[in-house]
C-alpha cells in the first residue's frame, strides 16, 4: 500500500488540491473565505463561551480553535474516508487506479484545511506566549501522529464502506455521540469533576485532541503518555490495513 | 454518437510493429460473481424468503488465449458479460476464481466520458487521466497540451466538465484514451467519436492505434465493423463463451440466430 501511495502521489495530491479549489470556484475571495469563516467562528464562540464560563478569552480561543480544528480533521478523514471509494467509483471501475488513492485524497484535503485552521490558535498561542517553541514542536508531532493514525483508519473505512453501505450512517451517529463526550468546547476538568473521567481515558478522540492542544496551552514541557497511545493505535490500524489489503484488495469493487 | 469508420480491410489481422514479443492475454476458467446485496432489516424481521436478491454469475468458466497479432471481437447481447470480461482482462475487476495472465501494457477505452471528475476542468481531468495511464510527470505536461489540442474545444478545456455538452466530453475522453500507444488495447462499444469534424481526426488516430497495438479486443454491436477489423471473435451469452473462432464464422452464426 505504501509503495502505491508513493508512486501515485502526484495524482492524489493533484486531486486533493483541485477538490479544495472547486469548493470556492467562481468566488472572488476564493480560499480566503475559509480563513474568514474560521476566524469568525473561533472568535465568536470563544468570546461568548469565555464570557459565560468566566474564562480567559485568548486562552479559550486557543482551546476552542484547536478543538474545532482537530474535530474537523477527524470527521473529514473518517466520515469522508468511508465514502471515498464509492464517490470515485467511476474512476476505479474504468481504470486500474489504486484504491488507496481515494482515502489519500480525502486525507490530504483535510490536511490542507487543518493547516489553515490551526494557524489561528497557533498564532494566538505564540503571540500570547502561552506556549514554548519546544511545545509547538510537540504539538506538531502530535498532529503528525494523529494524521497518520486517521489516514490508516480512513483506508479501513474506505474499503469497508464499499462492502457495508450502512457504515457511513453508523459513523455519523457515532460521531454525534462522540462530539458530546469529547472535550472540544468544554474544559476537560468538567468531565473529571463529575466523575466522567473514564470517558476521557477510553476515548481515542480525546487523546487526539489532547496531544495536539495541551502543549499549546502551557509553557511546561510534558511528554504525554497519550502520544504512546496514538502510536499504538497507528500500529493496530496499519496491521488491519495490511490484512484487508492482502485478503480482499480489489475484491471490494465487486460490492460497489 | 458513433460513426462508422472507413477503415481499410488490410488492417484486419495486422501484426504490430511493437517490440513486445511476449504480448498475450491468458484467461483460464475465469469466473466472476457479484456478491448479493445485504438483506434489509425489514426483510430480516419479516423473514420474507424472496427478498434477497441473488445475482447470477457474470462470467462462467471463461477460457481464452489471445496472442500477439490477434484482433478479437467480443459479441453478445446487452448484459452478456462483455464489459465485465474486458474489465477482468484489464485487471480492473478481480475474478472470483480462475487464472488471469497478461503480458504487455494495457490501455482501455471503456466509454469516453466515464471516470471524469465533472467538477474539475477538462485540463485537470486530462492531467489526472494521464497520470493514471502511467505517464511520467515530466511527460505529462507536454502530453496534456497534445491531448487538449487534439480535443480541440478551445478555452472550454479550462471550464468544469459539468458544463460540457455530450460531444465535448466525447472529444476529451477519446483524446485522452488514445494518447498512449499500448501493447494491448481493450475497447468497449466505442469506436466513433463526436461530430463529423472530429470524426476524421478520430479515424486516423484509431487506425494508428490499431496498427501499433499488438492485441486488440473490441466489444461492439456493429458486426460489419467487427468483421472488417477482427480476425477472431468470441460470442458471449449469460457470461459464458458460446462460440469462438474465425471472426466471419462466429459473427455469421450470431447474425443468423438474432436476425
Image (cartoon, rainbow, N blue to C red):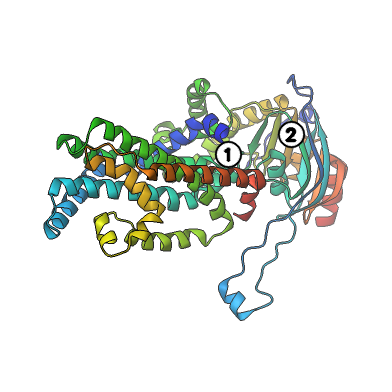
Whole-percent x and y of residue A67? 28, 49
Q: Determine the CA span between mark 2 and mark 1.
A: 24 Å
Is residue B259 visible to us here? no
**For the point 21% across and 37% down, which residue is it?**
A219
Residue A104 placement (x, y as % from top left): 48, 40
Q: Quadrant of the N terminus of chain B?
A: top right
Q: Pick whichever, B1 or B73, lies toward us.
A: B73
Q: Nearer the viewer, residue A84 or A123?
A: A123
Q: Nearer the viewer, residue B99 or A217?
A: A217
Q: Secondary structure at mark 1?
A: loop
A121 sits to left or right of A202: left
The residue sitting at 87% across, 50% down in the picture is B253
Which residue corresponds to mark 2? Answer: B216
Label 2 resides on the chain identified as B
**Marks 2/1 same chain:** no
- x and y, in percent, of residue B200 in the image: 60, 31
Q: Residue at x 36, y 41 (%)?
A: A20
Q: Is residue A243 left or right of residue A199?
A: right
State the image quarter where residue B156 is shown.
Answer: top left
Percent position (x, y) of residue B236? 79, 50
Q: Quadrant of residue B37?
A: bottom right
Q: Residues within 10 Å of mark 1 (few under 14, many from 20)?
A: some
Circle 1 residue: A98
Q: Nearer the viewer, residue B26 or B142?
A: B26
Number of residues whose C-alpha sits closer than 10 Å to that of mark 2, classed few (under 14), some (14–19) or many (20 or more): many
Secondary structure state at the residue bearing disc 2: strand
| Residue drawn where x is 45% and y is 59% of the image | A171
| B19 lies above or below B107 | above
Q: Which quadrant: the C terminus of chain B?
A: bottom right
Amino acid at each position: 500500500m505504501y509503495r502505491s501511495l508513493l508512486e501515485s502521489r502526484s495524482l492524489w495530491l493533484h486531486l486533493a488540491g483541485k477538490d479544495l479549489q472547486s469548493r470556492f470556484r467562481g468566488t472572488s475571495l476564493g480560499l480566503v473565505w475559509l480563513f474568514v469563516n474560521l476566524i469568525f467562528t473561533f472568535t465568536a464562540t470563544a468570546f461568548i463561551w469565555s464570557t459565560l464560563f468566566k474564562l480567559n478569552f485568548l486562552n479559550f480561543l486557543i482551546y476552542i480553535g484547536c478543538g474545532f480544528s482537530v474535530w474537523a480533521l477527524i470527521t473529514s478523514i473518517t466520515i469522508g474516508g468511508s465514502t471515498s471509494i464509492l464517490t470515485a467509483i467511476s474512476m476505479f471501475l474504468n481504470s486500474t487506479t489504486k484504491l488507496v488513492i481515494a482515502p489519500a485524497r480525502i486525507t490530504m484535503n483535510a490536511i490542507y484545511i487543518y493547516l489553515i485552521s490551526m494557524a489561528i490558535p497557533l498564532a494566538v498561542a505564540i503571540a500570547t506566549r502561552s506556549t514554548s517553541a519546544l511545545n509547538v514542536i510537540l504539538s506538531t508531532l502530535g498532529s503528525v501522529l494523529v494524521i497518520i493514525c486517521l489516514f490508516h483508519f480512513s483506508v479501513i473505512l474506505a474499503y469497508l464502506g464499499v462492502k457495508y453501505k450502512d457504515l457511513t450512517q453508523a459513523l455519523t451517529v457515532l460521531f454525534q455521540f462522540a462530539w458530546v463526550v469529547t472535550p472540544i468546547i468544554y474544559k476537560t476538568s468538567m468531565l473529571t469533576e463529575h466523575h466522567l473521567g473514564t470517558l476521557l481515558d477510553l476515548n481515542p478522540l480525546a487523546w487526539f485532541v489532547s496531544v495536539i492542544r495541551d502543549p499549546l496551552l502551557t509553557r511546561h514541557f510534558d511528554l504525554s503518555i497519550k502520544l504512546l497511545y496514538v502510536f499504538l493505535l497507528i500500529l493496530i490500524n496499519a496491521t488491519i490495513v495490511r490484512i484487508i489489503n492482502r485478503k480482499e484488495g480489489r475484491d471490494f469493487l465487486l460490492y460497489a | 454518437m458513433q460513426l462508422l469508420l472507413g477503415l481499410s480491410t488490410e488492417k484486419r489481422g495486422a501484426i504490430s510493429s511493437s517490440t513486445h514479443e511476449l504480448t498475450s492475454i491468458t484467461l483460464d476458467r475465469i469466473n466472476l460473481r457479484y456478491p448479493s446485496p445485504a438483506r434489509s432489516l425489514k426483510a430480516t424481521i419479516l423473514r420474507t424468503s424472496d427478498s434477497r436478491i441473488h445475482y447470477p454469475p457474470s462470467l462462467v468458466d471463461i477460457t481464452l488465449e489471445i496472442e500477439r497479432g490477434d484482433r478479437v471481437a467480443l459479441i453478445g447481447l446487452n448484459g452478456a458479460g462483455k464489459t465485465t470480461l474486458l474489465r477482468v482482462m484489464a485487471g480492473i475487476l478481480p475474478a472470483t476464481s480462475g487464472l488471469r495472465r497478461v503480458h504487455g501494457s494495457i490501455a482501455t477505452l471503456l466509454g469516453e466520458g466515464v471516470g471524469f471528475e465533472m467538477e474539475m476542468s477538462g485540463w485537470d481531468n486530462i492531467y489526472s487521466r494521464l497520470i493514471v495511464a502511467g505517464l511520467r510527470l515530466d511527460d505529462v505536461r507536454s502530453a496534456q497540451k497534445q491531448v487538449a489540442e487534439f480535443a480541440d474545444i478551445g478555452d472550454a478545456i479550462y471550464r468544469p466538465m459539468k458544463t460540457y455538452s455530450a460531444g465535448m466530453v466525447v472529444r476529451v475522453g477519446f483524446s485522452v484514451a488514445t494518447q498512449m500507444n499500448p501493447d494491448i488495447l481493450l475497447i468497449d462499444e466505442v469506436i466513433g467519436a463526436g461530430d463529423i469534424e472530429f470524426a476524421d481526426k478520430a479515424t486516423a488516430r484509431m487506425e494508428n492505434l490499431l496498427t501499433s497495438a499488438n492485441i486488440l479486443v473490441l466489444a461492439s454491436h456493429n458486426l460489419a465493423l467487427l468483421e472488417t477489423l477482427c480476425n477472431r471473435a468470441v460470442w458471449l451469452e449469460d457470461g459464458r463463451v458460446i462460440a469462438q473462432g474465425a471472426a466471419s464464422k462466429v459473427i455469421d452464426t450470431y447474425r443468423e440466430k438474432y436476425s
